[in-house]
Image: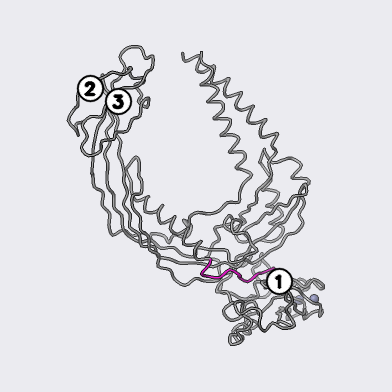
Amino acid sequence: MADLIQFKCPSCGGKLEFDSASQKMKCPFCLSEYDASEMQQEDAVLDQKDEQKEERYDTGDSTWGQGETDGLRIYKCQSCGGEVVGDETMAASKCPYCDNPVIMTGQFSGDLKPDLVIPFKLDKEAAKKSLLQHMEGKPLLPKIFKSENHIDEIKGIYVPVWLYDAQADASYRFQAKKIRRWSDQQYAYTETSVFSVDREGSIHFENVPVDGSEKMDNTLMESLEPFNIKDAVPFQTAYLSGYLADRYDVDEQTCAARANERIKQSTRQEFTRTVQGYDTVTIEHEQIHLNEGKARYALYPVWLLNTSWNGEKYVFAMNGQTGKFVGNLPSDKRKAWAIFFAVTAAVTVIAYFIMGMMQ
Amino acid sequence: MDFLMPLIIGLVVGLIVLFSLLSQLKSVSQKHEASDYVVQNSLHLNVRNDRLIDKHTERQMVRQAMPQGGSAGSVPMQNASHPQSSHSPGMHSQGHQQGGGLTIVDAPKNKH
Ligand SMILES: [Zn+2]
Ligand SMILES: [Zn+2]
């Protein structure tokens, strides 16, 4: 059976949780608060285990032994002795019996130890409130959705992400045109000046994130960007107490492709932006070389809200740091057609009269 | 009077309104760029070169009499290296051109 950490309250022995409002470890029983930095000694085990690589993700199946069945891992709650069952990537959770927070140290030891974590800034209530706001002011959202859509589950989860740095060395040739028009009594003139424009140089990118969790939808994660890396702190398991967390299961190399794609697109945009004073600019030749640094492994805070309406599932997500809220909503088809026809008819009639008056 | 033009305007506005309302419901989409992660002022150019490689002028006869449409007479004036000249009939503020069959004497390039 694998190891768990629980953070005990020094005053009453209750289990401490990370409190997003105070950014401290808080005891839900006696309300004592402690700095996360005071809990550092608990994480010593993560580095000790460095030699025991058998618990690493990429060596996988070999030595998990009794604890592992069909991709499931079983842990024993230190508070109540109950069995906590998780999948291969579960790294923090709550005991289903006593509701105490548990953290799976094996998921963070050695190479699996994240470099950074952005602690949760916003709580569950903020997520609920944002869901209501998210449904506000959208005429095509079916009215009953708001009243009937019910939340099946809200979870605060630390999502594993890879952060990439890169310097892009690029060279471009553009064709750019300036167009000048004028006219005299007889003719209208169009003068086109064609330029060949060369640009060469470099640009730096930092901390481009890529979702390292198979379970977490990549598009949803990208929709929650940007996270502010300035709030990131060196990883400590204490920040996970009371939340869910997963460890990565898509590796650094695989995720790099996605980051590079985005970096190249931005490089293209930034270099094109330096070609100014023209009416049209097209790329004739492009060469980008990326010098990548080492990726960092971080955990980003996300509130996930699973809801259902009319037998369909709707997933919403909130950036646990900035509060950015996303999630696609259903549309009222009949109302959409009604608005379309009403607007079209009204504008047509108005345009008809205005054009009639101008004649 | 023509009813087609107002209807087209109406349809265009109707579609714009419809799509903007529908887009309110969609907030999940892929990010294609990394502009949030560009290090400030990290763009350095060591080559910055703009060369004029061609300049050409074309002219179109401006209407003198009543419009009554017809294809525009657009004749490229002398062209150095780019034989194609962009036609953009109707874009000019002075309005319709007179119907075809115009011959325009070429003016030397780069005038005006
Ligand atoms: Zn306590
Ligand atoms: Zn328990």
Establish whether labels 2 and 3 are both on one chain.
yes
Amino acid type, label 3: Ser
Residue nearest the viewer, comparing A27 with A7:
A7
Left or right: where does residue A191 sit relative to residue A337? left
Question: What stretch of residues is rendered in magenta?
Answer: A243-254
Mark 1 crowd level (few <14, some 14–19, many ≥20, 10 Å Cα) = some
A342 to A65, vertically: above or below = above
Mark 2 secondary-structure assignment: loop
Mark 3 crowd level (few <14, some 14–19, many ≥20, 10 Å Cα) = many
Write down the chain letter for disc 3.
B
Q: Quadrant of the N terminus of chain A?
A: bottom right
Mark 3 lies on residue: B74
Mark 3 secondary-structure assignment: strand
Per the rendering, the mark at residue B104 is 2
Looking at the picture, the colour scheme in use is one colour
Q: Nearer the viewer, mark 1 or mark 3?
A: 3
Mark 1 secondary-structure assignment: strand
Q: Horizontal and vertical percent for residue A50?
A: 58, 85
